[in-house]
Image: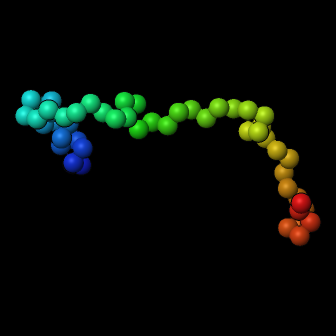
Amino acid sequence: MSARVALLRMQADGLICLPPSQNPKNGRRPPVLLTAASDPQPLLSAPVHELP
């Protein structure tokens, strides 16, 4: 059991009082926004020395 889980269980049992979470979304990253830059690009088929 991780320390975080133990602390949350002790808080649920009323043994301790923790401050509010600084990251209310449970550490989840925001979704990636799709733009023209994220569109599929043509495959590279040239040797490395010919690439721009």
State the residue at coordinates (85%, 67%): 48
Res 26 seen here: no
Residue pictured at 23% horizontal, 41% vertical: 5
Give x and y (percent) for residue 32: 61, 35
User: Farthest left residue?
Assistant: 15
Tell me the residue at 22%/33% (across/down): 19
Which quadrant is the C terminus positioned in?
bottom right
Front residue of 14 and 42: 14
Q: Is residue 42 left or right of residue 16?
A: right
Q: Tell me where residue 49 sits by quadrant.
A: bottom right
Report the residue at 18% width, 43% height from top. 6
Going by the picture, which residue comes out furthest to the bottom? Answer: 49
Image mark count: 0
Q: Quadrant of residue 45?
A: bottom right
Residue 10: image quadrant is: top left
Q: Is residue 47 visible?
A: yes
- How is the structure coloured here? rainbow
Question: Where residue 9 sits: x, y (%)?
Answer: 16, 36
* Horizontal relation, residue 20 to residue 31: left or right: left
The percent position of residue 17, horizontal first and vertical second, equals 14, 32
Q: Is residue 21 left or right of residue 47?
A: left
